[in-house]
Image (cartoon, helix red, strand yellow):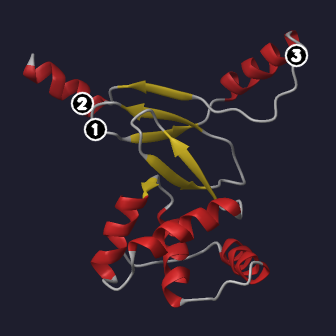
Amino acid sequence: MKVNFKNKSALDQFKLEKYKRGLKTSKKRSYIVQYFLAADRHYSIEELYDELRAEHPRIGYSTVYRTMKLLTECGLASERNFADGVARFEPIHRTHHHDHLICTGCGKIIEFTNRNIERLQQTIARKYKFVTASHKLELYGLCAACQKKKRKNS
């Protein structure tokens, strides 16, 4: 994958956080950050490591792991756990909140937004005099491809 990094401010924020923590700037770490943010998808450490190693065999697993943890601490990534026991990381979307559909067949993750769901959550919170700090909505089931495969095998 050729990295076409457009979010310069996120990379600058990452560099500032590294500087504050007294961490060195390395080409490998910078490449990991650029690759992850440009791909804009949900990665386990293993998936990201495998993709990075295909182009840069000298990148180590521990470097990928530590970089992803640092991105999370800096507020540029969030760690998600979708019922399969595998931690996945996704870039923080500062411009919008989104929820997830997770396929229990193939593991596909679909992001979606829905204003009606957001309004309903606010209405419920107000009804119970509850102030929300954050929320996440995850719907589990089968994607269209897995439904089709299941029908074929039945």
Asked whether the residues under the numbered discs 1 and 3 touch, taking CB atoms below 8 Å apart as contact, a structural biologist would say no
What is the residue that sits farthest to the top in this orientation? Answer: 127
Q: Quadrant of residue 142?
A: top left
Query: What residue is shown with label 1?
Result: 106
**On the rendered image, what quadrant is the N terminus found in?**
bottom left
Nearer to the camera, 40 or 88? 88
Mark 1 and mark 3 lie on one chain; the one further toward the N terminus is 1
**Residue at 60% from the left image edge and 74% from the top image edge:** 6
Helix, strand or loop under label 3? helix
Q: Amino acid at mark 1?
A: Cys
Residue under the point 59% across and 29% down? 137
Q: Nearer the viewer, mark 2 or mark 1?
A: 1
Residue 33 against residue 46 in the figure, above or below? below
Q: Amino acid at mark 3?
A: Arg
- Give the Cα separation between the discs numbered 1 and 3: 38 Å
The residue nearer to you, when weighing 151 against 68, is 68
Label 2 with label 1: CB-CB less than 8 Å: yes
| Residue density around tag 1, few if under 14, some if 14–19, many if 20 or more, within 10 Å | few
Please tell me which of labels 3 and 2 falls first in the chain. 3
Query: Residue 145 location, x and y as percent?
Result: 25, 33
Q: What SS does tag 2 mark?
A: helix
The residue beneath circle 3 is 126
| Residue nearer the viewer, 93 or 26 | 26
x, y percent for residue 48 = 40, 64
Circle 2 sits on which residue?
Answer: 146
Q: CA distance from mark 3 to mark 2?
A: 38 Å
